[in-house]
Image: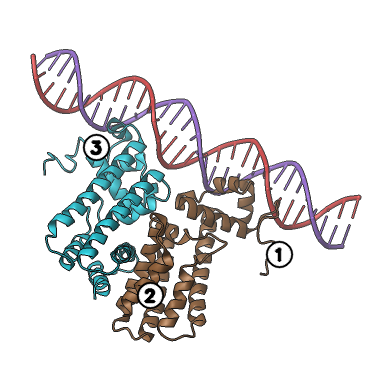
Chain colours: A brown, B cyan, C red, D purple
DNA sequence: CGCAGACCATACGTTAGCGTATGGACTCGG
DNA sequence: CCGAGTCCATACGCTAACGTATGGTCTGCG
């Protein structure tokens, strides 16, 4: 990457460090864990650092949402481009991407559900999530149409709903994401 | 019902009133909205009343979780009993129950997603949700087995995941719960 | 070397909420 | 009518966090 020091160099912090810490806290403890002083303690620093890099807590939250939107959007375009395959092959490629826990270094696997929970309290986040849902559904619908499904919109809704649900179930029961998605695809594309 | 005054009689409050208010707040603003003084303001009273009926905030939360467990369990047994039909008929009856927003007067439609979000921060809730997931999956598996599905466990997982996902999507896009569930059933039982 | 700016620590003042304590008010049986 | 119990209001001390203000430290550049 182009960043000189991607993680902490033990002394100076960058805004990205705070954002990464924010995603970790979000995945761990949900939206109420996004507080300045606990984050600072977690990073072994003080809030003086935080308020140097950010105007206030809302600024960090806004940047987190913006980053999530960028990453999720990149996931979509990457999926579209990577799947030169037509029809079913594209969907299987997509499954590979989804089941591998997208955001990786930032956040991790639990970010998406936590962010959806966060959306319940902050309208700004709710709007971002709603927009992303619509976006993803549109792409999925295209895939299912290519694959020759009779009702691509319905199939997209079901596939996406199952994806969200399996994410949830991975947290309570330890459901296997990939196997579930493949089975769902088999059910929808007989 | 057997309750003498189910809602407020404008002066005296009961524990159930506080619990109902708690579910409304939970559905509205998520777990962080479960605070004593805001709840009191919402009920037009003071926290003196709250601490008369409950030892502390944890007590209210515990009773809320307990009540949710009872109601959800009743939903399950009602579903099992109500569906004297075998196989597919039982599942269709179940869809009718699910899509109608179970908890009704308490809470409402948004309670389940909010509670799942709440589970992320409080282990007590997480355990209750995990147990309920396992319980529901077991019942669903039985239904799919009766309906003659080849892999009832997988089908149950997918149907339940789709249900959870459609709940989520109802909040962002205004997805139609019942139609989605019926379509999912068609996909799983060809 | 020495200063300027970037970065962080600390000490405030303020707010929101928790739980307690204490003193009403209202009700009902005697 | 009156006391006992039920239910609520208010005031208090406490804590955690917010955002500000101010000073300290380090680093590179001139």
Residue at figure coordinates x 32%, y 49% from the top left: B25
Closer to us: A69 or A82: A82
Q: How many marks?
A: 3
Label 2 sits on residue: A137
Q: Which chain carries label 1?
A: A
Label 3 sits on residue: B15
* Quadrant containing the C terminus of chain A in the rendered view: bottom left
Label 2 Cα neighbours within 10 Å, binned few <14 / some 14-19 / many ≥20: many
Q: Mark 2 lies on which chain?
A: A
Give residue A161's position: percent from left, percent from top: 34, 68
Give residue A135's position: percent from left, percent from top: 41, 74
Q: Is residue C7 left or right of residue B6?
A: right
Q: How far apart are marks 2 and 3 (CA)?
A: 43 Å
SS assignment at label 2: helix
Tag shown at residue B25: none
Give residue A132's position: percent from left, percent from top: 42, 70
Nearest to viewer (mark 1 / mark 3): 1
Residue at figure coordinates x 26%, y 51% from the top left: B107
Asked whether the residues under the numbered discs 1 and 3 touch, taking CB atoms below 8 Å apart as contact, a structural biologist would say no
SS assignment at label 3: helix
């Amino acid at each position: 990457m182009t960043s000189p020091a991607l993680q902490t160099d033990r002394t100076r912090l960058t805004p990205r460090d705070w954002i990464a810490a924010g995603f970790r806290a979000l995945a761990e403890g949900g939206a109420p864990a996004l507080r300045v002083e606990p984050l600072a303690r977690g990073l072994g620093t003080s809030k003086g650092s935080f308020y140097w890099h950010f105007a206030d807590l809302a600024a960090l939250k806004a940047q987190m949402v913006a980053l999530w939107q960028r990453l999720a959007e990149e996931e979509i375009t990457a999926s579209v481009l990577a799947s030169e395959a037509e029809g079913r092959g594209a969907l299987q490629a997509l499954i590979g991407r989804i089941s591998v826990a997208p955001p990786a270094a930032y956040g991790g696997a639990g970010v998406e559900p936590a962010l959806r929970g966060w959306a319940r309290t902050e309208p700004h986040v709710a709007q971002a999530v709603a927009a992303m849902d619509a976006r993803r559904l549109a792409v999925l619908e295209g895939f299912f149409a290519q694959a020759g499904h009779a009702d691509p919109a319905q199939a997209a809704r079901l596939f996406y709903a199952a994806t969200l649900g399996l994410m949830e179930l991975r947290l309570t029961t330890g459901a296997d994401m990939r196997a579930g998605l493949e089975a769902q695809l088999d059910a929808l594309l007989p």
